[in-house]
Amino acid sequence: MQRWSLVVLILGGLTVLMVGQSRGREWRIDGTLIRDSGVVRSLDLNAEDMERLIYGVDEIPGYECRPNPYNGIHTLIGLNSNGDKLSGWLRSHIVRGWTNVSTVKLLRVEVRVYDKPASEYETYENYRWGTQVLPVKGSFSGLPLGEECFRYGKKQIWFRLGRCVVEIALLVRREEELADGLYIEALAWGIAYRVQQHPKRLGMAQRAMTVLVAQRPVAQGAAMSLAGVTVAPVSLLKEAGTETTVNRTREEWVVTLKRNGRWVKVKAFSWEMETGKGRVKLERPVFPYKGELIVPLRQVAEALGMVVHQRGQTIALMAK
């Protein structure tokens, strides 16, 4: 129960902020509590729009969304906070908690969306001077995640992208033994992809990418650049004659790709791929989106024996 007490403080803390706005509507759907305070102003984002920004309840292998035993909630969505006032900041947010099925450690993901670029509301300097624990600038890997990024120890990462701010934290006591900064960061890259893919254009402006297989465009809109590295769904490689096998269980999500005697195995939230020649470090981690895994396109395609040519926003996959 001590762990759930911690969840109450975390999820409940957001509830207090929401309850503080007396007007508006509140309703529940399964384990999700939704409150809309936009009686005067609105961001034009509904609960479904907010769900698009975060992993589904069953998308993180090894974790599950267990409703809080005190209130039956695992997800909180606050729409149009401060929207009951004529002016001032305007924000919507979603926070969801998962429990590790083996260790019972807790994972918390929160996304906040503002009416303006998030840099006008949240920056590293705000946290540097506003907390007792000094955050460290940059990601765990050293890669440029979002427009600004910082971390706490090995168990928490924060980044800002467009109108969004994202915080991911692993709630453990024995940080050195249990926390994995690169795993937390892999989760973060998946959220960054979701922000950029959002139909309401919440991320940074980015020109659309085109992937050609046999001179024919495939998977329009699914491929995109994450800090200079193009990522795309594994299903895109089927168009190039790749055989795909999916092994998705409660504990892991693995996809094996085979083509002309070569094979590649990728796993959700891993920074490596297995090949017939051994393990290879990936330029970006693997993560799930809409029921399939997203991978660094060039590395995986080349490991399967394809030639990859890129010119501007167009990538061509060709057989050797």
Image (cartoon, grey):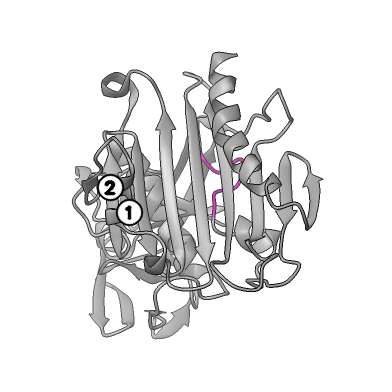
Answer yes or no: is residue 1 visible: yes
Q: Name which quarter of the figure residue 159 lies in.
A: bottom left
Q: Is residue 8 above or below residue 40?
A: above
Q: Are marks 1 and 2 in contact (CB under 8 Å)?
A: yes
Q: Give the side of residue 266 with respect to residue 281, left or right.
A: right
Please state if 138 lies on the left or on the right of 48 as rendered: left
- The residue that label 1 is drawn on is 126
- CA distance separating discs 1 and 2: 6 Å
Q: Residue at x 54, y 49 (%)?
A: 55
- Give the magenta part as a residue range: 54-60
In the rendered image, the quadrant that contains the N terminus is top right
Q: Amino acid at mark 2?
A: Trp
Residue 279, placed above or below residue 149 = above
* Residue 31 located left or right of residue 14: right
Observer-nearest residue: 270 or 157? 157
Residue 294 pos. (x, y %): 43, 57
Dominant SS in magenta: loop
Q: Quadrant of the C terminus?
A: bottom left
Element marked by disc 2 = helix
Q: Where residue 135 appears, x then y in whole percent?
A: 25, 43
Q: Is residue 76 above or below residue 206?
A: above
56 falls in the magenta region? yes
| Residue 129: mark in rendering | 2
Q: What residue do we see at 78% from left, 58% from top?
A: 24
> Residue 290 versus residue 98: which sits nearer the camera?
98
Is residue 159 found inside the magenta-colored segment of the image?
no
